[in-house]
Amino acid sequence: MTKVSDLCTFLENFAPSALAESWDNVGLIIGDPEQKVCKVMTCLTITPESAAEAIEEQAQLIVTHHPLPFRPLQRITTLETPARLVWELAGAKISVYSPHTAFDSTHRGINAQLAEIMELVEVVPIRSGSLGGDVGAGRMGHLHHPITLAQLVARLRRKLNGATCEANFGADHPVQSIAIACGSGGSLLAEARRLGCDCFVTGEASFHTVLEASAGGMALLQIGHFTSERFAVEHLAELIQQNFADCSVWASRRESFPRHWL
Ligand SMILES: [Zn+2]
């Protein structure tokens, strides 16, 4: 029977923790490697909703993209949200594993998948990791011919549900050499520009990052933090299912990003 440690080994092979950023908190964060597993839920983030789903469905393991806890906790009481979720999950004997930035950067990771969705060629990392080769932070690549921002957005929308895109240039602006950093990827913008990219695609960027891109004549497309990463935890659930036939694996059905346009 599958144990938590079997899934940890599989996930470590898929997204080696050596690829994670130094500030990150990846791997098995809560739990018991010896625990037997028959139900696994993936999610982007552990929230009260996704935690309740895992508890009601009697999962033994949550694979969450964003770590919980992320920062050290000095006390675990029900008075603050991250600690309360840790308390509730531990009480329900649910282990938690997070691949986070290792998942962003790995061979078939989130940024590599986004590069494929945009049909980029000659794809390489923006910043090579310690493992070298085709893995590392972000991705950049080219299109055979320039396309407009509107056409690039259409490609993303075909594969990413509900992508609401915000750009610093108009729909007709042409792009050809494209960098991608899922989530909040602004820290890779300057590097992508130095490497000659004319467009930077990320989940979300700060006001000043947008101004910096504009000043350098670089298109900056924000597709939403949730949208830029959630699809990948759905793919990850499928991948785990294919490799662990004795487990039932699903991507959280209750997870959503609360956003209303007023
Ligand atoms: Zn993220």
Image: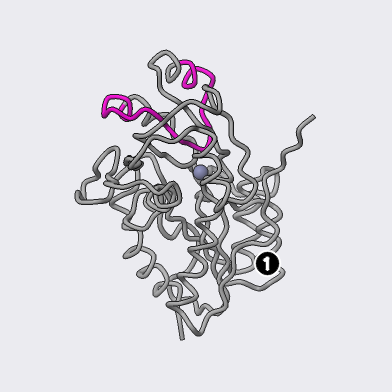
Q: Is residue 25 above or below residue 150?
A: below
Q: Is residue 69 left or right of residue 101?
A: right
Pick the residue in front: 88 or 47.
Answer: 47
Residue at the farthest front position: 145
- Identify the residue shown where x is 64% and y is 53%: 85
Measuring from the top left, give residue 125's x and y in whole percent: 29, 43
Pick the residue in front: 25 or 153.
Answer: 153
Q: Is residue 245 above or below residue 232?
A: below
Q: Is residue 187 magenta?
A: no
Pick the residue in front: 41 or 127.
Answer: 127
Amino acid type indicated by mark 1: Ile
Pick the residue in front: 151 or 84.
Answer: 151
> Would you name the residue on which mark 1 appears?
55
Measuring from the top left, give residue 257's x and y in whole percent: 67, 45
Residue at the farthest right position: 262
Q: Is residue 196 magenta?
A: yes
Measuring from the top left, give residue 177's x and y in whole percent: 34, 34
Question: What quarter of the picture does the C terminus occupy?
Answer: top right
Measuring from the top left, give residue 255's x and y in whole percent: 67, 54
Callout 1: CB less than 8 Å from ligand 1? no
- Identify the residue shown where x is 55% and y is 38%: 223
Q: Is residue 40 above or below residue 253?
A: below
Residue range (magenta): 191-211
- Identify the residue shown where x is 53% and y is 56%: 64
Q: Quadrant of residue 43?
A: bottom right
For mark 1, give the secondary structure.
helix
Q: Is residue 153 left or right of residue 87?
A: left
